[in-house]
């Protein structure tokens, strides 16, 4: 996710911004965050406190986890959070720029578990096509950027999505990644029925007696010298 093919930033920072925008469009949906490399970790459990999620998201940095891509473990961690949920719609959005090479759970096995739990998975391959600049630490020169081939297992990501009724997307730049999250948001709208009640508080009683008094005075005035105008 450190590759610089999502100008003007790397994939990681662009993905963070896309996730933030996606969550900002939610209203009453519980959302959580799982990060993964060689292992997968829950950084934010399912919550309606979007502010807390944003704090976690803002503090995420590259390099904090052992290198690797454990897609199956990441999906299993998500499913562990979702399995007891009573929500009508349960969704995982998986964004990765690599090929599964770590973890004890195979991605397709995790997809089958998701199907059994009625969890839909949308998968996103993050990376341009061809070559991309990637930072590496050189013993002599420190951090340098080299062109490396972009390797994303699109076949596996497509099968994961299709197994669960989801869709596979390929994001090759910042605008396409933002559009993908927008599209997913539109696909996962749930209709909600809301009952509206109107409470009427009758306040005429406090004005009724004064009004009757004025009517009575008017009737009496008609039988006095005030009943005729000069």
Image: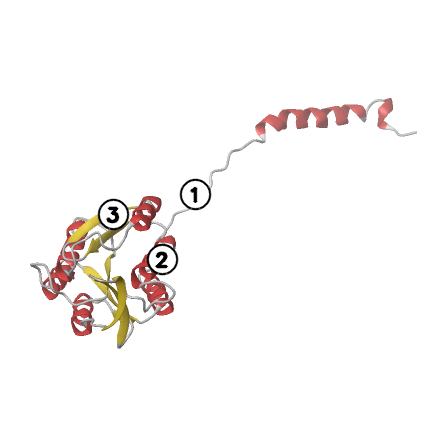
Q: Where is residue 104 drawn, in percent x and y?
A: 6, 59
Q: In which quarter of the view is residue 183 placed?
A: bottom left
CB atoms of marks 1 and 2 within 8 Å: no
Residue 170, horizontal then vertical, whole percent: 28, 71
Front residue of 152/114: it is 152
Residue at 26% across, 77% down: 130
Given residues 195 and 85, the one toward you in this image is 85
Q: What label sits on residue 46 in the rendered view?
A: 3
Mark 1 or 3: in front is: 3
Mark whose residue sits in front, 2 or 3:
2
Give SS at disc 2. Answer: helix
Residue 156 to residue 119: above or below: below
Residue assigned mark 2: 17
Q: CA distance from mark 1 to mark 2?
A: 39 Å
Residue 52 position, x and y percent, is 32, 44
The residue indicated by pointer 1 is 197
Question: Which of the two labelled residues, at mark 1 and mark 2, occupies the earlier sequence position?
Answer: 2
Question: What label sits on residue 1 in the rendered view?
Answer: none
* Disc on the earlier residue, 2 or 3: 2
Left or right? Give the position of 158 relative to 212: left
């Amino acid at each position: 996710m450190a590759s610089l093919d999502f100008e003007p930033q790397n994939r990681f920072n662009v993905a963070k911004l896309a996730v933030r925008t996606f969550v900002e469009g939610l209203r009453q949906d519980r959302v959580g965050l799982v990060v993964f490399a060689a292992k997968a970790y829950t950084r934010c459990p399912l919550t309606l406190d979007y502010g807390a999620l944003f704090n976690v998201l803002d503090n995420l940095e590259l390099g904090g986890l052992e290198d690797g891509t454990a897609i199956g473990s990441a999906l299993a961690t998500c499913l562990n959070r979702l399995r007891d949920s009573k929500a009508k719609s349960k969704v995982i959005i998986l964004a990765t720029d690599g090929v599964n090479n770590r973890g004890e759970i195979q991605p397709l096995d995790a997809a089958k578990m998701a199907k059994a739990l009625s969890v839909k998975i949308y998968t996103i391959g993050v990376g341009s096509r061809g070559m991309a600049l990637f930072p590496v630490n050189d013993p002599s020169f420190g951090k340098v950027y080299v062109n490396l081939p972009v390797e994303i297992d699109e076949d596996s990501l497509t099968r994961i999505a299709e197994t669960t009724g989801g869709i596979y997307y390929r994001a090759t730049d910042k605008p396409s990644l933002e559009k993908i999250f927008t599209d997913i948001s539109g696909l996962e709208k749930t209709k909600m029925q809301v009952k509206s009640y109107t409470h009427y508080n009758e306040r005429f009683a406090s004005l009724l007696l004064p009004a009757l008094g004025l009517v009575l005075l008017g009737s009496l005035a008609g039988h006095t010298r005030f009943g005729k105008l000069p």
